[in-house]
Amino acid sequence: MTTLSGLVIRQQEPRNLEFPFERLDSYLTPVESFYIRSHFHAPGLQSDSYRLSVGGAVKNPLVLTYDELKSLPAKTVVATLECAGNSRVFLVPQKPGAQWELGAVGTAEWTGVPLAMLLDRAGLTDKACDVVLEGADRGQPAEPPKPPDPISYSRSVPLDKALEDVLIAYGMNGVDLPHDHGFPVRAIVPGHYGMASVKWLTQVLVLEEQFQGYWQTSDYAYWDEVDGIPVRRPLSEIKLKSEIARPATLEVVPKGQLYRVYGAAWGGTADIVSVELTTDGGLTWAATDFLDPIRPHAWRRWSYDWKTPDQPGRYTLMSRAKNAAGASQPDKFDERYFSYVVHHTLPIEVIVQ
């Protein structure tokens, strides 16, 4: 089922809508095509009554109106957001959660106020170490273990990240944030999975210890190991990934002709430097051509002119990205992440006839 804008409905309410990735045709994802991930019903905030509080381990707590935020010096950044559960449908056996295919990802131009500016005004205490971003959306989480009472959606980022490039955004692709994308104000945490970019932001709380909230430990977390002891850690940085937009899964393509394979790659702090494509299930790989320059925390689209086989049949295509740090996209899913961080090479089967 799809919406009028063509987004695929993964959940009607709260709204969880996916961009059909085979429609990828521009560097910036149009606002109406950008995926929507909501945990609870969207709150009905109004710009004239909106307030953002900055408190906790600060010397001068702040409360700012929407107009006051927009009057401060603005910054615009381009950043790719990806839901941590994107591509979950490819996991076998099936894992719980929204069965996203390839399109819970998008790139937009975000405009707002650097969080560092607000923290500077508030004045941090010497022991400040973690910054909680809390939204106005509130409810009972869908997955166990569930807390006994309704909770707000909140995530934290380390202080150094908060001071580096986190944006308190009120604009998206040159227009005011749409309601489903966090109007009036949301956080944008470049390079981190989308759950960090809290929508409907109403509170910034600076802590002198690590945040241990539900969305930091029970959900959006994974199992690591320290000296043989399992340790729970929050998800953070987007992992290196490439996806094929066209051809789509089970698309029928003509034999013996040139077909333009097209996709995008993103993830991590290191620059994406190459994407390779296999059209024979991994036996051979060929370099693709980039369509976009390197930009921090934003995807690079790529393409490849494939001479389709003369022999009809089913063929498996996969792409894999490499970055400047020498990392390569893995070929298997890391089970420590359970149902998140699906960034291994994903097979796209096509029919040549």
Image (tube, grey):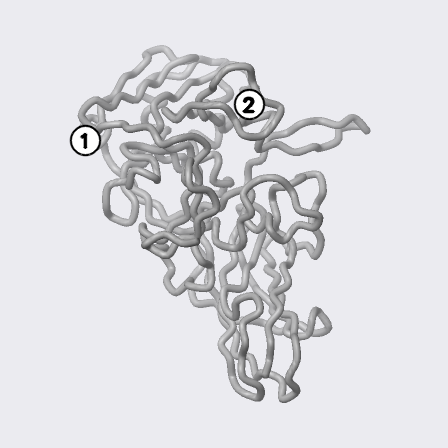
Q: How many marks?
A: 2
Classify residue 186 as left or right of residue 232. left
* Element under disc 2: helix
Badge 2 amino acid:
Tyr
Residue 195 vertical position relative to residue 290 in the rendered view, above or below: above
Q: Residue at x 47, y 34 (%)?
A: 196
Q: Nearer the viewer, residue 52 or 296?
A: 52
On the question of residue 268 being in view, the answer is yes
Q: CA distance from mark 1 to mark 2?
A: 34 Å
Residue 307 vertical position relative to residue 59 in the rendered view, above or below: below
Label 2: which residue?
214
Q: Residue furthest top?
A: 59
Q: Nearer the viewer, residue 41 or 73?
A: 41
Residue 85 vertical position relative to residue 248 in the rendered view, above or below: above
Rendered location of residue 100, percent (x, y)? 53, 49
Label 1: which residue?
71
Residue 152 vertical position relative to residue 200 in the rendered view, above or below: above
Marked residue nearer the N-terminal end (1 or 2)? 1
Rendered location of residue 319, percent (x, y)? 60, 64
Rendered location of residue 315, percent (x, y)? 65, 74
Which quarter shows the C terminus? bottom right
